[in-house]
Image: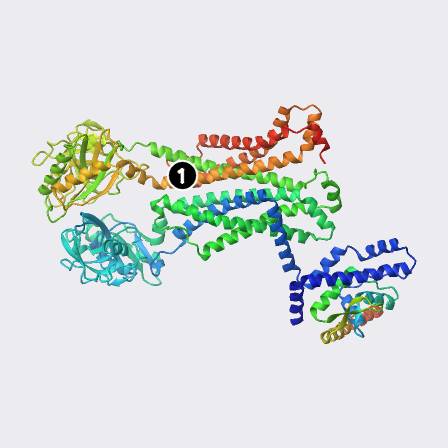
Amino acid sequence: MLTDLQYRLRSLFRRRKVETEMDEELRFHYDHQVKKLMSSGATHDEAVRQARLVTGGAEQLKEECRDARGVQFVENFLRDLRYSLRMLRKSPGFTIVAVLTLALGIGANTAIFSVIDSVLLSPLPYPDPARLVTIKQNDSLQNIDDIRRQTKTLAKGGGLTTERMDYTGGSEPLQIRAAYVNAGLLETLDVAPMLGRLISPDEDVKGGPHNMVITHHFWREFLGADPNVIGRSLTLNGNRWSVIGVMPPTFSLPEDETDIFVSLWVAYPEAAPFRGVHFMRTYWRLNPNVTLEQAQADLDGIASRLARQYPDTEGKRQKTLVPLHQFLVGEIRPALLVLFGAVGLVFLIACANFAGLLTARAIARRQEFVLRASLGAGRARLLAQAIVESVVLSLLGGAAGLGLAKWGTSLLVSLEPADLDRFRGIQMDARLFTFIFALSLLTGIVFGLIPALGATDGNASNALKDSGRGTTAGKFSHAFRNVLVAAEFALALILLVAAGLMIKGFARLQSVSPGFNPSEVITMHLQLPITRYDKIPQQTAFRRHLLSRLNGLPGVEAAMVTDLPFGGNYLDHRFVIDGRPPVPVGNEPTVQTLSVMGDYFGVMEIPILAGRGLTESDRENQPLAAVVSEEFVRRFFPNENPLGARIDFARTNEPHQWMTIVGVARDVKHGTLNEPPEASMYSPFAQADEDWRRWMSLVVRQRGLAESSGLVAQIKQQVWAIDNQIPVSEIRSMEDWMSASLARQRFNMLLLGLFAGLAMLLAAVGIYGMMAYRVSQRTNEIGIHMALGAQRTDVLRFILADGAKLALGGIAVGVLGAAAVTRVMASLLFEVTPTAPATFVVTTFLLAAVALAACYIPARRATRVDPMVALRYE
Amino acid sequence: MPPRIELPQGTLDLLILRCVANEPQHGWAISERLQQISNDVLRVQQGSLYPALHRLERRGWIAAKWGASENNRRAKFYSLTRKGEKQLDAERDAWEALTAAVAQVLRTA
């Protein structure tokens, strides 16, 4: 064993010495052979000839000896590597195109893979995340407490709702984001605080201490990362709150962003006891070894007990358990998978191009292969060399792809799609390197082997005879390249159609009217502090005062509304219609409920279709008035005139306060553009009876003036002139709100469009390379045609037809593929049928045009062939 | 010239080991000796001989040493190692057992 190793090592590291010794040994044998033949009477020349015959090819023999020495593999590998690098340096054009092609394919794949890895595959950042579940439906604190008392399958559970709180310690009043929680919430997520402690159950009661836990972000940004922060207190909503804990930097809530955590019982004792207001998200931790099904059965039991006990609020409610991870990624999952499929296709096209390049090169180097084969190189050796070369290329491509991916993911992050909140850029970890390395290596081996198989195939002596004339290049290789180019077009068409449908859907979405005119409207959010504005009259006075001041500014029209369209907030109420048969309690229909003040319909340019809008005279002590939306009329007054009808919210123990419908407004999209319109109802702020709706959004239209920052400052000034403790937040134009609501669709469209563009580019490069190569191979033939009288246009047509056949074949297959693939995308498309014929036609023509353009350059070159030169060629 | 016989697989190793058993030999001498002793029946091609020599050397059954040939040229001489002696014995026994058995079958069957 030892001798074996020594021997191999000597052969490897003292290679030159070993090689000369082998030469000398074989020479010695050969000389004796010659001498022996001459002594038996042959002439010197005859003896030499015979000795050569007997001894066979010298190189081949040496190869076999090297094989016998058992170092062949490493040695060959190093030699091939050196040789490959030399060859690649010699043809930089080929090298650059091949590396770039792969870099694009691998880079795009890596970028999307890293997104999928961190968003879909990575576990949630909480201990034992597999046991975390959520109930799809929001719930009330009372129900959460009942579930916690009754459950046998859930170990812990908690809920939260987010609110804004006014922070008035700093230079100007600010709003911070607060999570109103129960003590169970942070306990369920099970992340220990970095400093201090969490809110304990005995503090989480009505009248408990004003304690808060703060996030790392808030600690750093607002409290200067004070290490002695525990015990410090801040003024929030007019009360002093003490910091009892700081969360670690890695901690965030599963869905919401927040600055602080406070007890719901302490911060909002009015809401805590309401069973029927289901405003909390809830998160739960399964007991060990409990399945989701067991927990769901347990929860169903609890839900039906609650329904029997409290039929008016809990009668019709369901509670559906979902694993938290699945719940969080559920919405973006199909989009990411489609994108992954798209980059997969781009990658395939890149590979086809790569293989095409290698094939062309292998054909061009066939003579070299044949020569080496006749000098004694076995086919396996030739294949190994070809593979080493393609692997070198593919690894270079992988490295360049990594760079591209890093750049690409920072681009992805900068698009800021809300769904990718959990994605914070590419992680250069072992997983990613393994992914890229495996992808590159596999590409190199597979796509190096196929063309090399074709090029090394066949009879050496035939090839030697033919290759001088440059006409034979292996039928296999040609057919293979044809298939590659056609396949590229098929794949590119699939991507183009997908992107086309996406763009069409997006365009259609953008052209959907929101129901109002968003241009030149600035919005901002105000929240009245409870300390001074807990009653409706105070609130109304402030609102009225502010609007009269704002409308006094030159060129400004201002109004206010509780919840802006596209602002993300939504409130609905169950309601009844006067004079209709009574509906069982809990089964009443719901309506989105908005309060407005000022000429809201005028400022937003929402047309009033019937009756009138709300005016300044719809105020306190006047008959209650309401404006409803078209959808409300369609749903509840399908064949009736709604004007004059009376409605009210469903009330259990109070007399009705009927509102009279005075007008019908055009439908306004409230959540996103791609959802159906809501049944909504507008009523005057001045006639509101819900004193807890202390917030409002200002909508301010400034006609003709583009410059808005001065206006914002003026508005703030007006607010603070009335009350300097009121924070002004979320200063955004109405167009920004709308554009944010389209972020996901824009993200999908941009990426898919980018990939389709890449695919088309790669396919064009592929067919261009193929045709350029063919023209150069057929120079001779073209020369003959022209010598026999063919015109330049004939040659042009003939070459273009050649290319068109390939491209159209691919496109035809692609149409079928696209029809199948785009069905998968149906969920991502807005009002576009996946087989929309126009998209197919347009993309098909686009791709065919690109193919023709790519073929035109080599075809032009073919027409410039000088018949005399071509015929003499070689 | 008597008809030449193709060497069965593996027997070349045995013959080489036997040739270098008495004294170190170079490749040419080994091929000549095989041919002479077998009365021209066994003729080993260079293409088989040298790879076999290198392989046996790697296995440590023969050792190579550069020395002067009969007409004073530098030549590579192969000699049997102790490991090679054992291998030779084992292969010879196996060969004899095989041929005896084959002969037995041919005689009696």
Residue placed at 33% from the left, 37% from the top?
A: A674
In this view, A747 is above or below A382: above
Q: Identify which residue, A207 or B19, lies in the foreground.
A: B19
Tell me where residue A260 appears, x and y as whole percent. 23, 54
Which of the colour schemes (rainbow, by chain, secondary structure, one colour) is used? rainbow
> Which residue does the image show at 10% across and 47% down from the upper left?
A532
Q: Quadrant of the C terminus of chain A?
A: top right
Is A588 on the left or on the right of A349, as rendered?
Answer: left
Q: Quadrant of residue A477?
A: top right
Q: Quadrant of residue A454?
A: top right
Residue at x 57% of width, y 36% of height: A767
- Residue A826 in sight here: no
Q: Measured along the vertical axis of the image, is residue A420 above or below residue A607?
A: below
Q: Amino acid at mark 1?
A: Met
Q: Position of residue B36 (x, y in %)?
A: 87, 67
Instruction: State which quarter of the image contains the N terminus of chain A.
Output: bottom right
Q: Nearer the viewer, residue A859 or A652?
A: A859
Give the x, y percent position of residue A763.
Answer: 53, 38
Tag count = 1
Instruction: Report which residue position mark 1 lands on.
Output: A749
Relative to residue A479, is residue A38 depicted above or below? Answer: below
